[in-house]
Each structure stands twice: as structure tokens, then as C-alpha cells.
Amino acid sequence: MACTGGGSNAMGIFHPFIEEDVDLFAVEAGGSGMKVTDKEALHSATLCSGEEGILHGMHTKVLQNKYGQILESSSIAAGLDYAGVGPELAYLADTGRLKPCNSMDAEALDAFNDLCRLEGIIPALESSHAVAYVKKAASTGELGDVVVINLSGRGDKDLETVMGMRK
């Protein structure tokens, strides 16, 4: 289980497991909803709702309008706020090797607070999306007995954002 924006964090943890019999979950930023207009997406869930296109010279999945113009994306986590995804992750999603999923900003904020309170860990808001998805999926039986969540980055960089949300 790993948060997924551009994809370096996710590929870093997924790479050793690609040939293994384990499920890979790429958790994207659902933002404030999965709505898309001609100018923006209220999320950054490229694997979940993007289409084939070109971004920064790479052929991958991108959030774009019907004319191929890249949309503004949205996420509470700066590291997930990206309108594209690395081509390796797009390939793994297209072939069914990994499951794209998402968590909303509010869910990630709740997971951030839970991890701080229960474990004494200040996670990055990016990784909080993965924790939030585990919380949801665990109740449905979608996950097995052992779940590995890649907690990447430090959450101290996000404290101002989190504290601002509490006002």
C-alpha cells in the first residue's frame, strides 16, 4: 500500500514485490471529490480517472480535458497534487497488476490525526492517504491478514496545513 502522486514513492516500495503474489494498492488523492470540469479536477486521482496522454514528455495517464489540455489537480497533500503519474505505474494499472484507489482529503486528515494520536508518528499528508484507504478497506475484507503501508516522508512539513484545517 503506497500513496501515489507522480509515483516514485509507490514504485520504490512496489518494485521488489512486482513478481510476488501480493496485492499492490496505489492510493491517490481523491481531493474534495472525483469531479472533473474542462479546467480542473477536484482531485489528483490520475490512475483512477485519467486518460492516455503526454505530460512532461512522457506517455502516461493524465488528467486532461477533451482537447488534451492538462487540468489543474487538487489535493491537501502537496506531493500528490499532480495531474499525471509515472508510466510504470500506469502500465501496472493497465495490466491489472496494481489496484488504483483513492482517499479524500478529509479521510487523509483523519488518518493523519489517528496515526499521531495512536502511534505517536507524524506522517506526511501524502502517506496519510494510504493509511486512510487501509482504514476503509479493512472493514470490507478487501485486505488480507498482513498489510504493509509505506510511510514516506515526515509530517512536520505538513503541520501548518493540518493546523490551518482545524480553525
Image: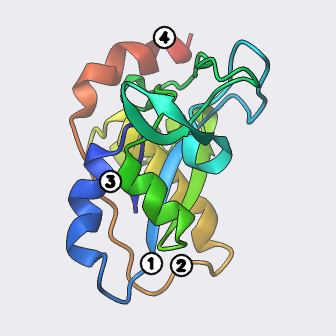
> Is 136 rendered above or below residue 71?
below
Q: Are marks 4 and 3 in contact (CB under 8 Å)?
A: no
Q: CA distance from mark 1 to mark 4?
A: 36 Å
User: Circle 4 sits on which residue?
Assistant: 164
Q: Nearer the N terminus, badge 2 or badge 4?
A: 2
Say the numbered circle drawn on residue 10.
3
Please count the marks in the image.
4
Q: Say which of marks 2 and 4 sits in front.
A: 2
Q: Amino acid at mark 2?
A: Leu
Q: Amino acid at mark 4?
A: Gly
Q: Secondary structure at mark 1?
A: loop
Task: Judge the density around disc 3: few (<14), some (14-19), many (≥20) Cα neighbours within 10 Å.
Answer: many
Left or right of 21, for residue 40:
right
Q: Are marks 2 and 1 in contact (CB under 8 Å)?
A: yes
Say the numbered circle drawn on residue 143.
2
Residue 133, can we see it? yes
Q: Amino acid at mark 3?
A: Ala
Left or right of 122, for residue 67:
right
Q: Say which of marks 1 and 4 sits in front.
A: 1
Quadrant location of residue 32? top right
Which residue is drawn at the image coordinates 64% and 41% (left, top)?
51
Which quadrant is the N terminus positioned in? bottom left
Q: Say which of marks 3 and 2 sits in front.
A: 3
User: Circle 1 sits on which residue?
Assistant: 23
Q: CA distance from mark 1 to mark 3?
A: 13 Å
Q: CA distance from mark 2 to mark 4?
A: 33 Å
Residue 120, can we see it? no
Q: Are marks 1 and 3 in contact (CB under 8 Å)?
A: no
In the image, residue 141 lies at what x, y percent? 63, 81
Q: Say which of marks 2 and 1 sits in front.
A: 1
Say the numbered circle drawn on residue 93.
none
